[in-house]
Amino acid sequence: MEATAKLNNYPTSPRKMRLLVDLIRGMKVEKALAILEHNPKHPAVPLRKLVVSAISNWKQKNEGADEATLVVKTIFVDGARVIKRMRPAPQGRGYRVRKRSNHVTVIVDAVGSKAPVAIAEKVTETAAPKKTKTTKKD
């Protein structure tokens, strides 16, 4: 049974947040938390809190289950609101400054869950091209 946690309108660019998200995608939760705790980038702190929140959401759904088997199943970053400002520029002009923000969604699940296997089977069925026989014509 998977659990979700969301972080909305965090004021850093989606590109900067994706650099961190790509580090922890598909990892065990304990290892992901350790990586985020020791990462010097500023979005690592709220991202770590978000993963902890997803773990606690999973604990509420699955009472008495062991969290050692948890994995970051899915994590993605979407763009959010953009605050537009003007910066003074030479000769009376103004440059646009776009202050970006993002939304992060984390889904954690246990390793032994049946859902990822079913998804993996569907992906391999659709991704594998069908083999056809070819005959040589002389």
Image: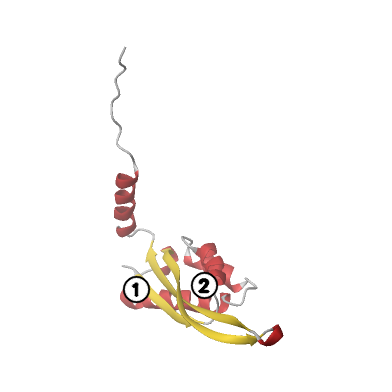
Instruction: Give the answer, above or below, for where 51 lies relative to 111.
Output: below
Q: Residue at x 34, y 57 (%)?
A: 116
- Marks 1 and 2 sit apart, C-alpha to C-alpha, by 36 Å
> Residue 33's x, y, as percent?
53, 70
User: Residue 95 or 52: which is nearer the viewer?
Assistant: 95
User: Residue 10 or 112: which is nearer the viewer?
Assistant: 10
User: What secondary structure is marked by label 1?
Assistant: loop
**Quadrant of the rendered structure where residue 12 is?**
bottom right
Provide the residue designation for mark 2.
14
Which residue is situated farthest in the top direction here?
A: 138
Instruction: Give the answer, above or below, for where 14 lies relative to 130.
Output: below
> Residue 106's x, y, as percent?
42, 71
User: Residue 2 or 100: which is nearer the viewer?
Assistant: 100
Say if residue 84 shows up in the picture: yes
Q: Quadrant of the C terminus?
A: top left
Q: Residue at x 39, y 59 (%)?
A: 111
Colouring style? secondary structure
Q: Nearer the viewer, mark 1 or mark 2?
A: 2
Classed neighbour count for the residue bearing mark 1: other residues with Cα under 10 Å, few (<14), some (14–19), many (≥20):
few
Say if residue 34 shows up in the picture: no
User: What secondary structure is marked by label 2?
Assistant: helix
Horizontal side of residue 107 vs 35, given as left or right: left
Provide the residue designation for mark 1.
64
**C-beta proximity under 8 Å, tags 1 and 2:** no
Instruction: Determine which of the numbered discs, if any, sits on residue 13 in the image.
Output: none
Horizontal side of residue 127 vs 72, given as left or right: left
- Sequence-first disc among 1 and 2: 2
Residue type at mark 1 is Gly
Q: Residue at x 71, y 84 (%)?
A: 90
User: Residue 89 or 138: which is nearer the viewer?
Assistant: 89
Classed neighbour count for the residue bearing mark 2: other residues with Cα under 10 Å, few (<14), some (14–19), many (≥20):
some
- Across the whole image, how many numbered discs are drawn on residues? 2
